[in-house]
Structure formats: C-alpha cells, structure tokens
Amino acid sequence: MGWRYKAGLFLIGTVVVIWVTSAEVTQDIFTAYKQPFAVTYLGASLMIVYLPVAFLKDWLCRYLERRRSSRTNEVEVGSPLRHKVIEMGLQGTITKKDSEEDFSSHEEDVRPLIGRGREETQTLKHGKEIVTTKQIVLYGLYLAPIWFVTEYLSNAALARTSVASTTVLSSTSGLFTLFIGALLGQDTLNLSKVVAVFVSMAGVVMTTLGKTWAADDSQLNSSLNGQRSLVGDLFGLLSAVSYGLFTVLLKKFAGEEGEGVDVQKLFGYIGLFTLVALWWLVWPLTALGIEPKFTIPHSAKLDEVVLANGFVGSVLSDYFWALSVVWTTPLVATLGMSLTIPLAMVADMMIHGRHYSAIYILGSTQVFAGFVIANISDLFSKKLGL
C-alpha cells in the first residue's frame, strides 16, 4: 500500500465529512431558496478556479526545471571526473602522444556516461503516456454534462427528501460502478461482487419502503410529502447511476495511478464548460415543472451561504474525491462514500429530530454491508477459489 493509496483513504474520510455537512447546509438553503439548478450550476461552475491554479503550477514547475537544468550543466562542466581525466593525461610517466590518446579515450568514456543519464531521464519521462492539454480539454467536455447531471439530481433529491435517504440511494452508485466498470474493462465481476449487488439492492428496497418522520415534516401535507419523497428517491437513484458512470470514466481517463492527467486542469475545464454551455438547461427544466421559476437569493447572508457551500461542498470536496478515485480505485472510493450513510442518519437525528423505522435502519445496514462485501471481493475470491 503506497503513499498515494493511504492519502486517498484519508481524502475519502475528509470528503465524507464535507459531503454530509454540505448536504445538511444545502437542505437548509432549500427552505429559503429552493433552486436546485442554481445551487448546482454555481457549485460546478466554481471549479473553473482550478484552471489558473493549474497553469500557474505548470509555469512554476517549468521555471524550476530550467533552473535545475542550468545548474546540472554547470556541475557537468566542472565535474571531478573531467578533472581526473585531465590529471591522468598530464602524468609525466607517459609521452605527450600517449597522453593525448589517453585523454581522448577517457574523454570518450566520460561523454557517454553523461549522455546516458540524459537519455535515461527522457526514457523516464516518456515511459508513461502523458495526456496532452488538448486531450484534457476533450475529457472535460465529455465529463462536464455527466457531472452536472449527477450534482443536479443529488441536489434535486435533497430538495424533496431527507439527507439520509438521499445518501443511502446515492451510495448505490457502487453497484453501477461495478457493472459499468466491467462493461468498459475497468473492473471484473465475480460471485462475491454479484452477491454484494443483491445485498445492496435489497437494502435499497427496504429503505424505500421504510418510514422516516420528523417534527418539521408536520407542516407539510402527508400525501404531498409522500409524493415528494418518492420523486426525491427516484432522483437519488438516477444520481447514483450517473455518479457510477462518471467515476469509471474518470479512472479510465486518468490512468491506473492518476499520473497521466492533471486532475486540477480536468476539473477546471469541467467548470468552464458548465459555465459556458449548460446554463440554458434551466429553461426546459422549468418548462417541465421539475425546476421552479429561477430567482436570485433575496439576502446578502443567503448569498454568502450559497457561495461558501458551493466552494467547500463542490469545488474543494469534489477535487479531493477525484484524487481519491485516481489514487485508490473507483470501488474503494465508492465504498468510502457509503460511510456517509450512518453519518447522515446521525446528523438528521440530531439536527431535524428525524426518526427511522426498523426496516429503514436494517436496509441501510444492508447497503453498507453490500459495499463491504464488494470491496473485499478479491480477497474472498482468492481464498475460496471463485
């Protein structure tokens, strides 16, 4: 287990806390400003801040590389090895002719030695396929709509159901990650993973059938609340599908260890394409009745909360999550995200006084158990010979 994998696990834990906190804040925002599209569009577009950061980083790296190269050349010119060759050529025990021959022969020995080091450096640089900026732009163009749909469906679910229910349903993305990963050649299916699928899906059905209630639900009509909850559950499940697709494609584009692509640039371009190309979606969503009529926040305080939540809950946490995906595996990252299930339930209990039926709690436990089985499936397969 290398340092990247360990750092990826640490980032997963960090993202879990940020996501649950951001989900609670987002749900509070929707009580005064129920605009899932606006919140999603702002959060995704803010990722454009990574572009200047990435280009500044590239310029700084090139600058430091030039300085190091110049220093290396200076060291090579005055290297002790060259001085030793000259001393050997000037020894008085050999003739001038022999001295010249020895000097030239040793000089030839030195040059390949220095040149070989440079060739090895080039080989190291080109040993792994480095993704060009043009390719990163194309990846950002492909991934931007998928990521926007994922975020919008998640926020739309939060506007219609509890944080815990949204979290449980979104966590089923691990199942879709498995199937999509196998379809695209990024993962393999075995018996233990199939068992994990059925266990988790059974848990999803149980959480959908299970009841939740809170004191702040009394102001809503019960039948209307039930309809809103079902729609919210549907959006949460669709969000899980698009999340699984995005996770697998991100890993596919980034490579095995994520060294082939600059994640900052990739997310920066996702933010750019969201800002420029996806703003018009508010019109069909409003026409279909999925999104309310667009309005801007009515107070400066609400503006600040929406902006801060977009930066921390989307820009920062999504970047950490992307690093955790490319530094570990899509399945491990998704498993880690399932830790949001118990944390979200506790948060809902403490903040909203929400209660859960036994069926709901058991279903949530099964979802989490399914992810655990899927995560250690390779170990089970090796031990049982499946």
Image (tube, helix red, strand yellow):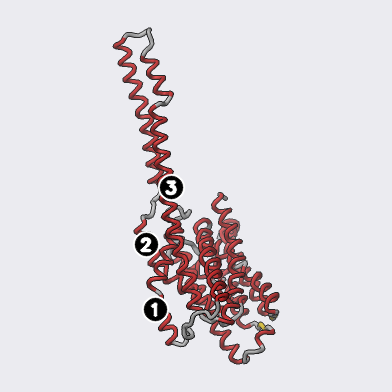
Residue type, mark 3 in image: Cys
Residue 238 spot, x, y in % from top left: 50, 77
Q: Residue at x 32, y 8 (%)?
A: 95
Circle 1: element type: helix
Say which residue label 1 marks: 280
Q: Residue furthest front?
A: 300
Label 3 packing within 10 angstroms: few (<14), some (14-19), many (20+): few
User: Which one is in front, 212 or 262?
Assistant: 262
Do residues under tags 3 and 2 come within 8 Å of each other at their CB atoms? no
Residue 98 spot, x, y in % from top left: 31, 12
Residue type, mark 1 in image: Trp
Ranked by sequence position, the earlier of labels 2 and 1 is: 2
Residue type, mark 2 in image: Val
Q: Residue at x 40, y 49 (%)?
A: 128
Do residues under tags 2 and 1 come within 8 Å of each other at their CB atoms? no
Ranked by sequence position, the earlier of labels 3 and 2 is: 3
Q: Residue at x 42, y 26 (%)?
A: 79
Number of the label disc, if any, that sits on residue 61: 3
Circle 3: element type: helix
